[in-house]
Image (cartoon, rainbow, N blue to C red):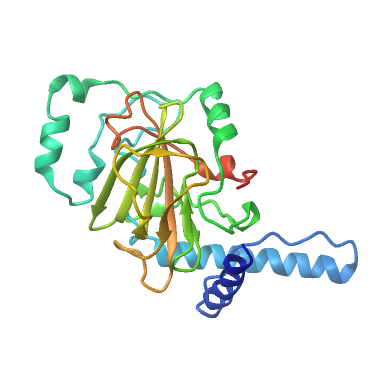
Amino acid sequence: MRRVLSHAAMASAALAAAGCLVIKDSPADTTATGEKASVAAAKAAQAARDSIAARLAGRDAPAATGAATKQGGAAAKPIDTLSALGTTRDSLAARGSSAAARAEPLVAPTAADIEALRAELAMPVAGVKPAQLFDSFDEKRGSSRRHEAIDIPAPRGTPVLSAAPGRVMRLFSSKDGGLMIYAADATERFILMYAHLDSYARGLADGATLERGQAIGYVGTTGNAPPDLPHLHFAIARTPNVARWWTGVPVNPYPLLHGAGQ
């Protein structure tokens, strides 16, 4: 752990030099000087957030799932995210071409679903604290699409951890997402997606059982991630059928992870 934190500190310095600070909350200070420092820190945090968003907008393109449905809204026609990412269409034709599969209704998460997910979630990047996260779920990517995920900057090679117990649905590679993992949680109601990985953990395979906190890969910049800004693109979606792991209703990971441990 000491080594990971050391690397994280060095990464923070490097990102700061590049104008992309790792966001941290400022401690409260009751003195006048402390209040000024807090205001300055808040402004710096917002500037850093804007800087990271500007650098990633339009480049960090993998969508959380194929559905563009908002929680609680009407179900939209499912879109195969894998096809949108420019991947092999033949394999998709075999999985999702039938009218019955296409017509399967999407399911928005209930409050009970969200609480069950919150209870099982852990931070998906080693050494990252909740205070270092920032919410980019609703930020635009390209001209018309929401990000529907969060980006977690970390040094290249930092372990990516399974955020929940469950199983691997598919190890996948795409032009935009790079090396990716689609995994089901233990309730099999949610799909968790990890993208831009540098590599997979040794022995990881489709169908493998996952423990919460298990190393499944390493932070990188594969796909369309900026080569000098390694980060994990982390997305969650509620799905009625984990076998169709490329579709679902996007769920914002940020509020669920903000109190998560490891």
Vertical position of residue 127 compared to residue 93: above or below: below
Image side of residue 213 versus residue 89, left or right: right
Image side of residue 216 versus residue 93, left or right: right
Residue 196 drawn at (x, y percent): 35, 58
- Write down the quadrant of residue 102 in the picture: top left
Q: Which is nearer the eye, 239 or 51? A: 239
Image side of residue 29 versus residue 239, left or right: right
Q: Which is nearer the eye, 143 or 181? A: 181
**Extreme residue in the right direction:** 31
Q: In this figure, what is the number of numbered marks?
A: 0
Q: What's the residue at 36%, 28% (across, down)? A: 239
Q: Which is nearer the eye, 106 or 205? A: 205
Q: What's the residue at 76%, 65% (across, down)? A: 38
Residue 228 drawn at (x, y percent): 41, 74
- Write down the quadrant of residue 128 in the picture: bottom right
**Extreme residue in the front direction:** 203
Instruction: Tell me, yes or no, if residue 143 can be seen here.
Output: no
Q: What's the residue at 29%, 61% (across, down)? A: 223
Q: Quadrant of the N terminus?
A: bottom right
Instruction: Tell me, yes or no, if residue 76 can be seen here.
Output: yes
Residue 194 drawn at (x, y percent): 39, 49
**Extreme residue in the bottom direction:** 17
Q: What's the residue at 49%, 52% (across, down)? A: 136
Q: Which is nearer the eye, 158 or 114? A: 158
- Write down the quadrant of residue 12 in the picture: bottom right
